[in-house]
Amino acid sequence: MPDTKEGRDEQAHDEEKRQREREMDEEMEYAEETRERREEREAEEDEDELDSDE
């Protein structure tokens, strides 16, 4: 790509888009990990409740 203002603008736009995609991926991973930890904790609490009922 020749070094033109349009080319530089396009590269900057592409980098901004990649950065936003990385941030969204990180947020989705965090949300997934949080959900998994919550499910594990709830499962443990259910097991504890069953154990205490016996």
Image (spheres, grey):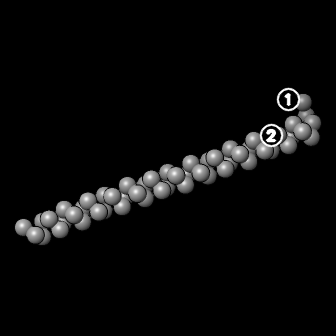
Q: Secondary structure at mark 2?
A: helix
Residue situated in front as seen by the camera: 19 or 54: 54
Residue 6 location, x and y as percent?
A: 90, 39
Residue designated by label 1: 1
Which residue is at a point 55% across and 51% down the rendered structure image? 26
Quadrant in which the N terminus is drawn: top right
Q: Is residue 17 above or below residue 48?
A: above
Residue designated by label 2: 11
Q: What amino acid type should be assigned to the residue bearing mark 2?
A: Gln
Residue 29 location, x and y as percent?
A: 49, 51
Q: Describe residue 50's horizontal placement relative to residue 40 as left or right.
A: left
Q: Is residue 23 above or below residue 6?
A: below
Which residue is at a point 59% across and 51% down the rendered structure image? 24
Q: Residues within 10 Å of mark 2 (few under 14, many from 20)?
A: few
Residue 18 location, x and y as percent?
A: 68, 44
Q: Secondary structure at mark 1?
A: loop
Q: Is residue 24 above or below residue 48?
A: above
Tell me if label 1 and label 2 are in contact, CB under 8 Å. Answer: yes
Quadrant in which the C terminus is drawn: bottom left
Which residue is at a point 90% across and 30% down the rendered structure image? 2
